Amino acid sequence: MFKIIESEVLTNRRHIHDALLDYRAHGSHIALDDIGTGYSSPAWPSTLQPDFLRSTRQLARGVATDPV
């Protein structure tokens, strides 16, 4: 499993996406950690297409009770 921490500054989306596709082809899983704390845009999860997401408590707070 490869874990990408959102606080990492990732600037070349195409390169990262292609590398992750290669890792997946070899059986690896991708995890994106600490969503909502770092430098990345909200588009990163859709760009990286991780197998696992871990968000911050602040991002998830009130999800069950807030209709948005």
Image (cartoon, rainbow, N blue to C red):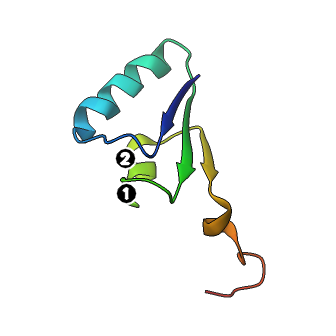
Residue 38 position, x and y percent, is: 43, 53
Quarter that holds the N terminus: top right
Q: Which residue is mark 1?
A: 43
Residue 33 position, x and y percent, is: 56, 43
Residue 56 position, x and y percent, is: 62, 57
Residue type of the residue flagged with mark 1? Ala
Closest to the observer, 4 or 67: 4
Closest to the observer, 38 or 45: 38
* Left or right: residue 40 compared with residue 37: left
Q: Residues within 10 Å of mark 1 (few under 14, many from 20)?
A: few
Name, please, the residue furthest toward the top. Answer: 26
Residue at point 39%, 18% (across, down): 22
Q: Which residue is mark 2?
A: 47
Q: Is residue 2 above or below residue 10?
A: above
* Left or right: residue 24 compared with residue 59: left
Residue 31 position, x and y percent, is: 57, 36
Q: Is residue 47 above or below residue 30?
A: below
Disc 2 is placed on an element classified as helix
